[in-house]
Image: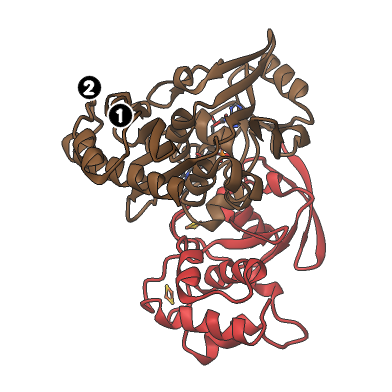
Chain colours: A brown, B red
Amino acid sequence: MVPSAFDFHRAGSVDEAIELLGRLPDAKLLAGGHSLIPMMKLRLAQPGAVIDIGRIQELSGVCRDGDVVSVGALTRHGEIAASEELRASCPLLAEAAGKIGDPAVRNRGTLGGNIAHADPASDLPAVLIAVGAVVHLAGPEGRRQVAARDFFVDLLTTALDPAEVITRVDFPVAAPGTGQAYLKHEHPASGYAVVGAAASVTLSGGRCTAASLAFNGISAVPHAADEVVSGLVGGTLDDASLASVSSLLSVRDPLGDVHASGEYRVELARVYGRRALASARDRASG
Amino acid sequence: MSYHVQLEVNGRRHEREVEPRMLLVHFLREELGLTGTNVGCETSLCGACTVLVDGAAVKSCTQLAVQADGASITTIEGLATNGELHALQQAFWDLHGLQCGYCTPGMILAAADLLERNPDPDDGEIREALKGNVCRCTGYHNIVRAVRRAAEGGAA
Ligand SMILES: Cc1cc2nc3c(=O)[nH]c(=O)nc-3n(C[C@H](O)[C@H](O)[C@H](O)COP(=O)(O)OP(=O)(O)OC[C@H]3O[C@@H](n4cnc5c(N)ncnc54)[C@H](O)[C@@H]3O)c2cc1C
Ligand code: FES
Ligand code: FES
């Protein structure tokens, strides 16, 4: 299986990538290639030109500045999972990245490629939503920022314009007293998420001051489960209250396929959501 | 369109003009004649094509040769030194970590990546590291034992 023929260009900088995107019709950016190359081999994607951004230094790395930790679009899943900085300041992201695919996939796949591809079975999109990350884009008109909730638009569709490049994602540093957890029910063959639950809770004096929960796998865009967590603030997050709120999960158009029906995924999500919140709580108090 | 690539494979430099769509695995097998790297699923799932690119395990069916331009690559042919098997190869041999051998080059290179990062893995860590490598024959137990034996012998 080989992709159909294309012209190959290597961009040395973000500006050059934007210039090439503007000049070449029908061009695709190539980062880690772990979504694009499989699609090209299956001829589900047949770009006329491929622009390799894989060597642009400025797009890679983790950098903390005060309350925000910035992760370059080219940072690989394996680097994210192993980053001491992220394990401390955004443990949800590090944990989810460490559960992607297998080590060889994590050696190549990147944050930017993962969210640009916007596969509902991916692990990182719900993480961005649960922590309120901000996606930074650069294009011919300049630079702009999009909140994670506005970034994912539909199945495999994002707010990214075809002329734009994702440069980095900014994650808020977890506040003191915060615990986070990513739990995944993975497809046994592909490793992708049938359901992935991303939870973050903050406790102060034994009471919840903030809680968020988002899901991969159950809908076309990651589901922000505000209906589940909105009643948790002020409470103690005991098991009984988590069990009762998790049943509130409500998904308008649950995604179903040959592996798992929509109803089954939502049922699984209720269980994984409860467990992810409980685990986040234990990490927050522990 | 063809593209000039220059890479080092098992310590030897190679230069070629390749079509951009050529996959790294085909470059290794067809351009360089290094057929130790196998093609299994062709869909990034089986790990038979795993090689080390700049030290990191990569599925060479999911990387273009042009992406590896300038890189240093290790395939199964490059592991033995002066005719002496690498500790992982020896342990797979001694402990029957293979039957048909189709998955073995990929298994060994994925294991080499693990031992580089974690010289003393437990069985769970070995299984986790080999998650992307499928074996249709052995049932995996002897593979895990072989990797542990190689670690004990200081393979990394
Ligand atoms: C066997 C296998 C198992 C996997 N399992 C999982 C899993 O369990 N969980 C999971 O989340 N993912 C999984 N993946 C997908 C993996 O995480 C991909 O690496 C990721 O989705 C895409 O990242 P990439 O860097 O490889 O992007 P590429 O494949 O290079 O690109 C993907 C898309 O994003 C665009 N793009 C890339 N970078 C940018 C950028 N900076 N700006 C704008 N557009 C950009 C490209 O043009 C392309 O359209 C798996 C992949 C494989 C092959
Ligand atoms: S042939 Fe590359 S992963 Fe199967
Ligand atoms: S030994 Fe036959 S596939 Fe592993």
Ligand 3 falls in quadrant: bottom left
Which residue is painted at 43% across and 39% down in the image? A205
Residue B135's spot in the image, x, y percent? 41, 71
- The 10 Å Cα crowd at callout 2, few under 14, some 14 to 19, many 20 or more, is few
Q: Quadrant of residue A240?
A: top left
Q: Is mark 2 within 8 Å of ligand 1?
A: no
Residue A175 position within the rendered picture, expressed as x and y whole percent measured from the top left = 55, 35
Q: Is residue A254 above or below residue A268?
A: above
Chain of residue at mark 2 = A
Q: Is mark 1 within 8 Å of ligand 1?
A: no
**Residue that extends furthest to the top in the rendered view of this protein:** A141
Residue at x-position 47% and y-position 78%? B144
Q: Is residue B15 above or below residue B125?
A: above
Q: Secondary structure at mark 1?
A: loop
Which residue matches tag 1?
A: A219
In percent of width and height, residue A274 lies at: 28, 42
Which of the two residues, A183 or B11, is positioned nearer the viewer here? Answer: A183
- Eyeballing the image, is B73 above or below A68? below
What is the spatial separation of the Cα atoms under label 1 and label 2, in whole angstroms?
8 Å
Q: Which mark is residue A252?
A: 2
Q: Is residue A60 left or right of residue A116?
A: right
**Tag shown at residue A65:** none
Q: Amino acid at mark 2?
A: Arg
Asked if the residue under mark 2 is in contact with the one under mark 1, i.e. CB atoms within 8 Å, the reply is yes
- A40 or B138, which lies in front? B138
Q: Can residue A4 be seen here?
A: no
A45 relative to B92, above or below: above
Residue at 33% x, 27% y is A220
Tell which subunit mark 1 falls on: A
What's the amino acid at mark 1?
A: Ser
